[in-house]
Amino acid sequence: MYFRRWTAALLAAVLSMTAFSSCKPGNEESSGGSSENSNSEAGISHAETYRIDVYSQLANYAGEQIGWFAKVIKDKFNIVLNIVPSGEGVFATRMESGDLGDLIVFGNDGDEYTAAIEAGMLLDWYEDDLIGRYGPDIERTMAAALEKNSRAFGEGEALYGFGHNVASSAEQAEAYIYHPDIRFDLYQQIGAPEIPTLEDFLPVLKQMVDAQPTGDSGLPAYAFSLFSDWDGDTVMAVKAMGAFYGYDEWGLTLYDTENQVCEPVLDPDGMYMRALRFFNQAYQMGILDPESATQTVDDVTQKYADGRVHYSIFSWQGPANYNTPTRLEEGKAMLTVAAQDQKNLAYGLNVFGNNRVWAIGAHAEYPERIMEFLNWLCTPEGVMTSNFGPQGLTWDYREDGKAYLTDFGWQTQQDKQATVPQEYGGGKWADGMNQINNTTFSIDALNPETGERYNHNFWQSTLERPVDPATAAWREWAGALTPDEYLDEHNYRAVAIGTDFVKPPRDAALDIKYKQVSTAIKDGTWKAMYAKNDEEFEQLVNQMIDSAKSYGYDECVAWDIAQGKARAEAENAVKAAQAE
């Protein structure tokens, strides 16, 4: 089931269909408005409470959805969600049982997704016109994403879902996921020295650690604290540094998004090795947390909250956990400071959707009610509710049509343990969040109700708010209102174009080699990171290279490079389609 790349002409047609879908006859109301009336006319009864088993490979929760989100969907659809997370052996066990669940979320569109289709475990949305009758908003606003899935996995004749983070336009990019955030107050304290290159961060961060050597708890602070539980084909933290220079992870290579070529991770002069040397130098300087190889993302998150880490790779980790209202008022914050040679990776919004797939189980008792729920998740109301909470409680629209967060909405952004009023479901805010843990439209897609992104950080109402002393100091230094504006205005930007390309599965023999090579690289990377000196570092790197090559590294890299060329072709097709 390998997805055939589209011609520029076909892409142009589909992109045009997506762009103008809100202008179709009979859709005079805002594109993406709720379809309750059409579904009611289609004969859906909500008299019976429907318990939906949601098998989500992305969920971090098990059991019945509770709290404010549970109340919203119970009141609206009379449904209850029973969340079943994945784990070792869960997929195989459910496949053997003959029933994956009612609503299914796949972590990617790879082997398990295709196996479920081939085993008849997933419902064809074209059957009995399920998508047309009960998912009109999905059909109207996600045409390219549906077409991609149908062609890739249903030979154009069947439809088994759609991928996450869909966009309404291919001409925008998501907010940056990767950007270097540092303790800006400490940076100013040491004189805010210039940082020409990645390597020039090291002496700056050493001064910052010397200025603040402990967290609030009194335990040691470091410039870097990494985690290993998210390592994939290579070490997450090392490959992620490539994102600061326009590289996207691509198996055992890094994909240079500007030049559209793959760079093998063991290239001595490549980005992966540059980042590995960088972290080893940090270790030799005493500013890399020695627990990095054995701790989890949760461990590191707690250290950020305690003020024990002064540099963050991910925008969602350091600032989100260190920048409390109290600290911000005290002038303390983790904020974006880029090296002058950076080209920060930004993911282009993708009208085709990405690889975390929504699907419906073949044995669902009421597939039309699941489709109705999915359809709502794809409307502005559904996207806003999933991300921010109930309308009226946490957000609403101003008289000028723009969205804003209420005082309680801002409280939930800053304190996930905020108490929700009983009439909205009660309990703690975090406990009531949507536990499916997947998206429909990208948070950075445009909300047709407002003309602004769904992402509240870019709302006019947000940018007009008074800011704390820490943010005010950073804005004066950066000459920008937001990290994205700062990176864009300084041309610290490289965009990975969103395409319809789907990587084919590796054959069984190659897959065995690939996993062996991957393990050799990950083990070798962590060992080299902790080298006591440059000589030991070079020895450990050479051992890693020899080990990886003995398992078939060159063959594996050749496969990744071939897929990179196919990706580049798909990107060029999107460029050509946009130019027409």
Image: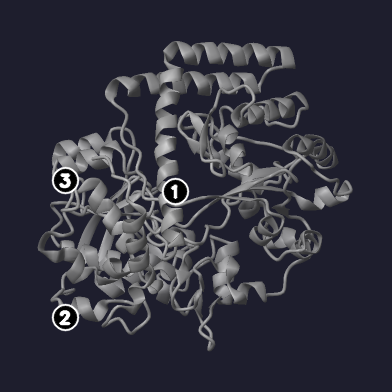
The kind of residue on which mark 1 rests is Glu
Mark found first going from the N terminus, 1 or 3: 3
Q: Which residue is mark 2?
A: 41
Real-space Cα distance between discs 2 and 1? 42 Å
Mark found first going from the N terminus, 2 or 1: 2
Q: Judging from the image, what secondary structure is the residue with disc 1 in?
A: helix
Q: Which residue is mark 3?
A: 121
Q: Looking at the picture, how far across and down is residue 398, in whole percent?
A: 53, 85
Q: Nearer the viewer, residue 498 or 163?
A: 498
Q: Which residue is mark 1?
A: 571
Real-space Cα distance between discs 1 and 3? 32 Å
38 above or below 171? below
Report if residue 371 is visible in the image.
Answer: yes
How crowded pointer 2 is (Cα within 10 Å; few <14, some 14-19, many 20+) is rated as few
Asked if the residue at tag 2 contacts the one at tag 3, i.e. Cβ–Cβ closer than 8 Å, the answer is no
Real-space Cα distance between discs 3 and 2? 29 Å
Task: Residue at 16% x, 80% y: name it.
Answer: 41
Q: Looking at the picture, how far across and down is residue 75, in whole percent?
A: 30, 74
Task: Residue at 42% x, 69% y: name it.
Answer: 385
Of the 4 image quadrants, the one containing the C terminus is bottom left
Q: Looking at the picture, how far across and down is residue 92, in whole percent?
A: 23, 34
How crowded pointer 1 is (Cα within 10 Å; few <14, some 14-19, many 20+) is rated as many
Of the 4 image quadrants, the one containing the N terminus is top left
Circle nearer the viewer, 1 or 3: 1
